Image: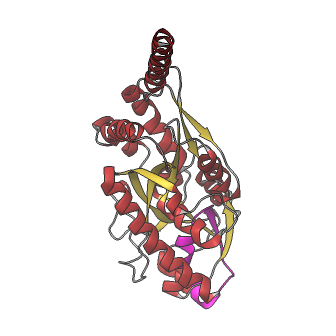
Amino acid sequence: MLKKNKICFFLAAAIVLAITGLAGCSKREEKYPDKNKSVTIIVERAAGGGSDLTARAIAPLLEKELGIPVVVVNKTGGDGVVGLNETAASKPDGYTIDLSADTVQAIHSVLYTDTKYTEDSWEYLAATNMTAYIMVLGKNSTFNTLQEVMEYALANPGKLTLGTPSGIAEVMSTLEVNTGTGFTQIVNDSGANNLASIAGGHVDIGLLTAQFYQQAVDQGLKVVGVTSPDRLPTCMDVPTFIESGYDVNIVQNFILIMPKGAPEQVLTTLRAALDKVGNSQEFKDSLEAIDAIPAYKGGEEAGTYILDNIKRIKSGLETWQASK
């Protein structure tokens, strides 16, 4: 009997050791980043727009920090919903992240009900950079200044066609509510396509992120206003709406997000890598090359900053929606 009990004991001990060993192997296999995997950055907009250019500035630098491939994938459709739905459905393992914007999260929260996410679904990894919007006159426009555009829009609500990229309802809300103007919005799926529409004379005026300033000027278009509170270093000759007498103060923060639920080791490693990227001179130089404004925030500060911005933008959108 004693011999039998000893055999059972040793068998049980062997099983426990085997399970422990397997668990140890499992933990080692789960260490992030796995050198046999790659990170995908999902961009909700078409190639060539501000978010796409930002993601492609981040990718090679993040790849260098993590030591694994980082690939940018454009998932367009539904004003960004298609890409965000895919991100929301992905495993929170650090291998799928999304280049979004605080404005997009606020807009979707207020205006869309058929999404797989809310602004509370995400781990906010970083705010990478910021931009404002420029008002650009169409190729055949008879206007010369921002004041001329706004005075006409005030006297003739809805008559001017305003080309915009998708996902900028917060700009329209602030513009119309704060100035009393009215425009007929023509939405394009990216900033690049919106610029083409403006340059082709298909709309009277257009709004673009400031990253498109030099491209607009190079195509002979006139830029008459910028929505930032102060003039931007990339276009110092363009007056702000505020200095022109209009209460329009809008900036957009590009952000990196992933679904909640990631292991702490994944978050710590990914955030540390992003902090190195975001604070590097190489990244700042890359942003300046695409006329973006470096404004990196990482760690817990990023989450607080982004959620505060989303709350502020949502409040303005709700006011605009109620006025419709």
Number of numbered discs visible in the structure rendering:
0
Determine whether, in the image, residue 132 is placed left or right of residue 86.
left
Residue 159 is inside the magenta segment: yes
Q: Nearer the viewer, residue 73 or 168?
A: 73
Instruction: Residue at 49% x, 47% y: name it.
Output: 261
Which quarter of the rendered picture does the C terminus lie within?
Answer: bottom right
Determine whether, in the image, residue 116 is placed left or right of residue 94.
right
Q: Position of residue 221 (x, y in %)?
A: 55, 59
Q: Nearer the viewer, residue 155 or 175?
A: 175
Q: Position of residue 146 (x, y in %)?
A: 48, 75
The colour scheme is secondary structure
Determine whether, in the image, residue 275 is placed left or right of residue 150.
left
Instruction: Residue at 31% x, 41% y: name it.
Output: 275
Instruction: Residue at 48% x, 80% y: name it.
Output: 147
Q: Nearer the viewer, residue 272 or 321?
A: 272
Q: Position of residue 95 (x, y in %)?
A: 52, 35
Give the answer, above or below, for where 313 lies relative to 214: below
Residue 211 appears in the figure = yes
Q: Nearer the viewer, residue 209 or 315?
A: 315
Instruction: Residue at 32% x, 54% y: name it.
Output: 300
Q: Position of residue 166 (x, y in %)?
A: 63, 61
Residue 222 appears in the figure = no
Give the answer, above or below, for where 174 lies relative to 277: below
Residue 306 is inside the magenta segment: no
Question: What's drawn in magenta, residue-wise?
Answer: 152-174
What is the residue that sits farthest to the top in this orientation?
3
